[in-house]
Amino acid sequence: MQEKILFIDDAHPILIEELTLAGFQCDYFPTYTLADYEKIISEYIGIIIRSKILMNQQIIDKAVNLKFIGRVGAGMESIDVEYAESKGIVCINSPEGNRDAVGEHALGMLLCLFNRLKFADLEMRKGIRNRESNRGLEIKGKTIGIIGYGNMGSAFAQRLKGFEAHVIAYDKYKTGFSNEYVTETSLQDIFANSDILSLHVPLTEETDYMLDEAFIKRFHKDFYLINTSRGQVVKTDALVEALKSGKIKGCCLDVIEYEKFSFEEIKAEAFPKAYQFLTKADNVLLSPHVAGWTVESKYKLAKILADKIIKTNFIKNK
């Protein structure tokens, strides 16, 4: 009998193709609800997810034959990793698959904000040709602070090399990473010297609302913010107040803390006041959590995850 893997979310076809060739039976039931999954999950040794359901203690306890949970992507906040691992379940993700996409997107947003490309384009389409109000800024000579120097932070730093900026990075859980792209530094140095701050941290208990009022006040200079990590890392109310005061001079947000809301079902005027402010501010650039969402990354995320699962060899007597 084949070992079975349950796909709760879809992925690039290469993932099913590779796992099937490796000897697994792959099942995908796109119309199933959580209750449906709970009824059948005991049949599977592996689960593939993105963010459709939360792999919490309740469902993990029902998955009595589970050997691994595969996350198509980087963030593991939809999995109770500690509890899963206490049950002997291996948790696997594939952050290498979209690090290039995130690095490029962060840089693209910064260039767009600094050169006012969004607003200049909209004005030109209306027949307005205003050069002075669209005068841009250069990255060259700026100090760019990166918090979190894993796959995403390092990819962003690499793409900054040709701009002749001073790139510094702090990572609480990583040391010895200074290289041609970045200088490892302390958090205090990030506060003291950053002209631009880019966040590349996972969402955990210690990063939830990490950038709040107190955190912002620790910066010695007014600065620009880029967040391509997770929305809830930034407290939006604090961000808005800092934008109003000028402490934060502008921001690029691929993620916001309100992502749990349905943008299709809620009218704009019903969104929190802080979000309404962001949508109207001309020093704010927004994108819908697509920094790691490229044609290429969809393939790489799936292929890398397949390779890791196959390498770990979860099939009996193989």
Image (cartoon, rainbow, N blue to C red):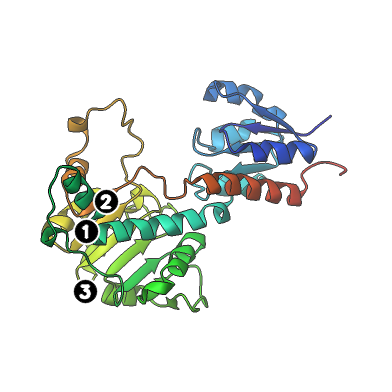
In this view, the residue in front, 54 or 251, is 251
Q: Which residue is mark 3?
A: 220
The amino acid marked with disc number 1 is Gly
Q: How many marks?
A: 3
Left or right, 153 with respect to 22, comes to: left
* Label located before the other in sequence (2 or 3): 3
Q: Position of residue 129 (x, y in %)?
A: 13, 52
Disc 2 packing (10 Å; few <14; some 14–19; many ≥20): many
Disc 1 packing (10 Å; few <14; some 14–19; many ≥20): many
Left or right, 98 with respect to 120, comes to: right
Task: Please report the residue visible at 19 percent of the width from the left and 62 percent of the height from the top.
Answer: 249
Give the structural element (helix, strand or loop) at label 2.
Answer: strand
* Label located before the other in sequence (2 or 1): 1
In this view, the residue in front, 74 or 101, is 101
In this view, the residue in front, 139 or 7, is 139
Quadrant occupied by the C terminus: top right
